[in-house]
Image (tube, grey):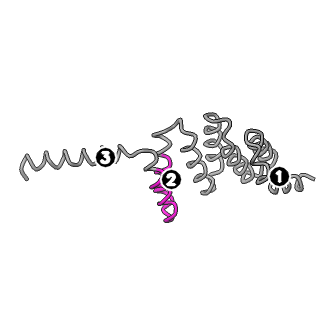
Amino acid sequence: MSVRRAIAGLLLGAACSLAVGAESAADLLAKADRLWAEGKLDQAQQGFEAAARLEPASAATLLRLAGFQLGRQKVSESIATYQKAISLEPKNSKAWIGLGLAYLHRSAPELARAAFDEAIRVDPSRKEKLAPLLAKLDEKKS
């Protein structure tokens, strides 16, 4: 192989890796969602985590990662990710609801109830949808 071809190959490889590295968080999330739907969970996880690294201050990106983590039964990780999203957007009712669901998976109904109550406080329109779940939590408490 000639030196020119070797250099051209190296440059092409570098350009390809730069193009892959230049993917936006939205692209990574879309790809991760597709991989998740295809059952390629380890690859999907890498995509969600890469998006979160690319946009660490995006509550929306963190919510997608947290939802994936919860879906994989990585409850402690999802709680930490939901909490980080909430620290970025305290008035994000979806983050509070996700945190509540994660607490339910951890068998912590008091914490779940508190998270759901906060979701309703920041977005009162959530009350009706959460009412059946809150009623079940209240039943179990009695």
Say which of 124 and 12 sits in front. Answer: 124
Mark 2 residue crowding within 10 angstroms, few (<14) / some (14–19) / many (20+): many
Q: Residue at x 50, y 42 (%)?
A: 52
Frontmost of labels 2 and 1 is: 1
Name the amino acid, label 3: Ala
Q: CA distance from mark 2 to mark 1?
A: 31 Å
The overriding secondary structure of the stretch rendered in magenta is helix
Give the residue type at disc 1: Leu
Left or right of 135 on screen, residue 47: left
CA–CA distance in space, label 3 to label 1: 48 Å
In the rendered image, residue 122, in percent from the top left (x then y), is placed at: 73, 39
Extreme-front residue of the structure: 125
**Of pointers 3 and 1, the one earlier in the residue sequence:** 3
Q: Which mark is residue 58?
A: none
Residue where numbered disc 3 is placed: 19
In the rendered image, residue 101, in percent from the top left (x then y), is placed at 71, 51
Q: Is residue 115 left or right of residue 74?
A: right
First of labels 2, 3 by sequence position:
3
According to the picture, the residue beneath numbered tag 2 turns out to be 45
Disc 1 crowd, CA 10 A, few/some/many (<14, 14-19, 20+): some
Residue at figure coordinates x 17%, y 49% from the top left: 9
| Residue furthest left in the image | 2
Q: Give the number of the disc on residue 134.
A: 1
* Left or right: 134 as drawn, with respect to 62: right
Read off the magenta span: 29-49
- Whether the magenta-drawn stretch holds residue 130 is answered as no
> Which residue does the image show at 77% across and 47% down from the upper left?
112
